[in-house]
């Protein structure tokens, strides 16, 4: 599989980066929100003023998407999604929606040669008000909680904004089916 190959090393590249496997072009986007529909946005460390929801790729081809979502939430925000914690597994909802998008050129080197598109699966995660966020400084430098409309407008990615704009409808659907 091309996903076990390693990045090509360039003279200017950090030697550790040369050993990283290519990213799998299948990822999750997790809209983290409170019962009041305030949405958590995090600012990327590698691209100033790029605000987004939690995102991340599968680590293994057979990794379940819900596991990818919970892992990425913990890695990027410190919020643990697990039964017996403040945020139980039932708080994570698979929205059963996926999109495909072109990989941004600035991040294309992370993928195997010839890979240009990523499939992204959308999830929602309802957390209590005042949930503590602990960012991974390697990935993100700031966070903010905003009403969903403002959060959607602040996202750098149009599809991330689209996901957040679906939040009120997704929450209504979830409460009807519960």
Image (tube, rainbow, N blue to C red):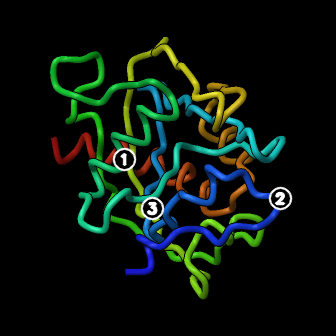
Left or right: 105 as drawn, with respect to 99: right
Image-quadrant location for residue 114: bottom right
Residue at (67% x, 53% y) in the render: 15
Q: CA distance from mark 1 to mark 3?
A: 9 Å
- Work out whether mark 3 precedes mark 2 in sequence or the reverse, and give the earlier one: 2
Image-quadrant location for residue 45: top right
Residue marked by disc 1:
69
Report x, y in % for residue 99: 49, 73
- Work out whether mark 2 precedes mark 1 in sequence or the reverse, and give the earlier one: 2
Q: Are marks 3 and 2 in contact (CB under 8 Å)?
A: no
- Work out whether mark 1 precedes mark 3 in sequence or the reverse, and give the earlier one: 3
Q: Residues within 10 Å of mark 1 (few under 14, many from 20)?
A: many
Residue marked by disc 3:
27
* Of marks 2 and 1, the one in the foreground: 2
Q: Nearer the viewer, residue 24 or 26?
A: 24
Task: Tally the numbered discs.
Answer: 3
Report x, y in % for residue 172: 34, 44
Screen quadrant of the N terminus = bottom left
Left or right: 156 as drawn, with respect to 110: right
Q: Are marks 1 and 3 in contact (CB under 8 Å)?
A: no
Residue marked by disc 2:
12
Instruction: Specify the farthest residue to the bottom.
Output: 114
Tag 2 secondary structure: loop
Residue at (71% x, 41% y) in the render: 44
Q: CA distance from mark 2 to mark 1?
A: 32 Å
């Amino acid at each position: 599989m091309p996903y076990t190959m390693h990045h090509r090393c360039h003279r200017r590249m950090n030697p550790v980066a040369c050993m990283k496997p290519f990213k799998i072009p299948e990822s999750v986007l997790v809209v983290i929100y409170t019962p009041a529909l305030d949405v958590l946005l995090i600012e990327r460390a590698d691209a100033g003023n790029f605000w987004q929801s939690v995102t991340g790729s599968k680590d293994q081809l057979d990794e379940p998407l819900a596991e990818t979502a919970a892992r990425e939430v913990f890695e990027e925000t410190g919020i643990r999604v697990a039964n017996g914690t403040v945020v139980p597994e039932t708080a994570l909802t698979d929205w059963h929606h996926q999109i495909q998008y072109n990989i941004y050129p600035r991040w294309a080197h992370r993928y195997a040669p010839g890979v240009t598109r990523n499939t992204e699966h959308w999830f929602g995660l309802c957390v209590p008000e005042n949930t503590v966020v602990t960012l991974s400084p390697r990935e993100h430098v700031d966070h903010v909680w905003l009403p969903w409309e403002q959060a959607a407008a602040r996202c750098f990615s149009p599809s991330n904004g689209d996901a957040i704009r679906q939040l009120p409808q997704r929450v209504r659907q979830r409460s009807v089916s519960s």
